[in-house]
């Protein structure tokens, strides 16, 4: 007996975008649409989101989440 609990999700249709009216050298506002379709989530519930930012050298750190 075997079960498939969730399929591999596809890439989101649109990535996050910064809000140029608010974003500056000292702050950033990021807008994104939540993942809602079965294709985007792979059939699983999205429990949380995590925003990371890169420092330009390949190192990322958590900003939110």
Image (cartoon, rainbow, N blue to C red):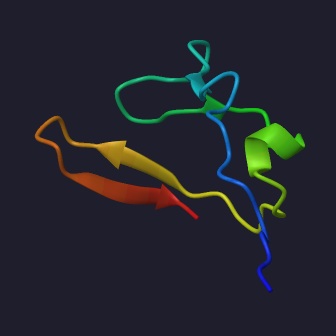
**Residue situated furthest right in the rendering:** 37
Could you tell me which quadrant the C terminus lies in? Answer: bottom right
Residue 62, image x, y percentages:
41, 60
Residue 32, image x, y percentages:
71, 32
Work out whether 61 lies above or below 30.
Answer: below
**Residue situated furthest top in the rendering:** 20
Q: Residue at x 78, y 61 (%)?
A: 46
Residue 30, quarter of the rendered image: top right
> Quick one: 4 or 43, which is closer to the camera?
4
Is residue 36 in view? no
**Residue situated furthest front in the rendering:** 1
> Quick one: 26 or 54, which is closer to the camera?
54
Residue 39, image x, y percentages:
80, 39
**Residue situated furthest left in the rendering:** 57
Work out whether 3 lies above or below 62.
Answer: below
Side of 51 where 32 appears, left or right: right
> Quick one: 57 or 28, which is closer to the camera?
57
Q: Residue at x 65, y 57 (%)?
A: 49
Number of numbered tags placed on the structure image: 0
Work out whether 62 lies above or below 15.
Answer: below
Q: Residue at x 11, y 40 (%)?
A: 57
Could you tell me which quadrant the N terminus lies in? Answer: bottom right
Side of 53 where 28 appears, left or right: right
> Quick one: 8 or 21, which is closer to the camera?
8
Residue 35, image x, y percentages:
79, 43
Is residue 57 in view? yes
């Amino acid at each position: 007996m075997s079960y498939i609990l969730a399929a591999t999700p596809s890439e989101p249709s649109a990535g996050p975008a910064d809000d140029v009216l608010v974003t500056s050298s000292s702050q950033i506002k990021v807008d994104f649409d939540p993942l809602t379709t079965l294709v985007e989530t792979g059939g699983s519930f999205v429990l949380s989101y995590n925003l990371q930012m890169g420092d330009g050298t390949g190192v990322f750190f958590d900003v939110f989440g």
